[in-house]
Image (cartoon, grey):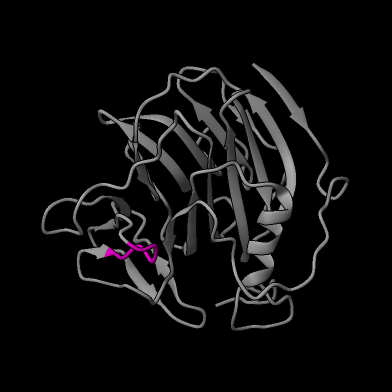
Amino acid sequence: MSIHVHKTGLNKTLGQQSDAIITADLIGNWIPGTGVNTHYWDNQVGSGKNLRRFNTVGNGSSPNHWIFDGTNDYFGAAESGYGGDPFGVNTYNPFTLAQWFKNDSGVVHVAFSLVYSSSNIAKLIISQSGGTANKAKLTVGSETPVEFDYTFADDTWYYISLVYERLTDVWSFFVNGSFVGSSTFSTDNIDSPVLQIGRDADTSTYSGGTIKLGHVHVYGEDLKNSQLRQNFLASHVINNTRLYGATYTA
């Protein structure tokens, strides 16, 4: 395993406000407040598979978001009667996982996990137990995990992205469209492990009750930082208290 880390800000990508997210190779687009069903969250990509709402995942407004109960709430594999078929990520190909979330200092958030046969093949967790508070830790298979050099502030919304480049096995982490760090992991490729948000399948750890989840995007391609920056700008207004602005505290 090799690790490459850049101090945040040294490799910042600038950009202007964009009206829309990147749509090329978009395979998963979940918007809070849109496609909210009793048992699942509807994928806004045509014919895209959905995410099942497990247990009592609640929703709030201003802006629209999801709230976990901190006990057993998460989004995961849909099934007949609960949103259709599971949403999987093809790890034989490059991909990008991205989401808006609101950090609460030191509270665990299982941002992403890719699950096959009841075990994680990869997971990204904020404030992981045994790790450093307010930092993101990536675990891929049995490789030694890497903790990225970025500290999340309390009570603040962030657009985080995990990008996998298939040919080199490089996994890169971005915050608000800016590169934070990367690591090279050898990966056992599995066709379509199931995407989960809010649950670590290996330890039955769940996102905390004060964590909030916003838009979620999945791409069947390794997006560049300029594209991630466009997604960030498309739904972020820095001084707006009703969108995913830094001053929003509800």
Above-or-below relation of 238 to 207: below
Q: Residue 88 location, x and y as percent?
A: 34, 42
Q: Quadrant of the N terminus?
A: top right
Q: Which residue is the extreme one toward the right?
A: 10
Q: Which residue is the extreme one toward the left?
A: 81
Q: Residue 168 location, x and y as percent?
A: 63, 23
Tell me if 96 is positioned left or right of 87 in this view. right
Above-or-below relation of 134 to 122: below
Q: Residue 99 location, x and y as percent?
A: 53, 57
- The picture quadrant where one finds residue 118 is top left
- The picture quadrant where one finds residue 18 is bottom right
Of 92 and 100, nearer the camera is 92
Whether residue 6 is visible: yes
Q: How many numbered discs? A: 0
Tell me the magenta residue range: 41-46
- The picture quadrant where one finds residue 6 is top right
Query: Residue at the location (39% across, 50% down)?
Result: 198
> Within the magenta stretch, is there residue 115?
no
Above-or-below relation of 155 to 188: below
Tell me if 220 is positioned left or right of 133 in this view. left
Q: Residue 196 location, x and y as percent?
A: 36, 46
Whether residue 176 is visible: no
Query: Residue at the location (49% across, 20% down)?
Result: 187
Query: Residue at the location (60% across, 78% down)?
Result: 243
Tell me if 135 is positioned left or right of 206 in this view. right
Of 69 and 167, nearer the camera is 167
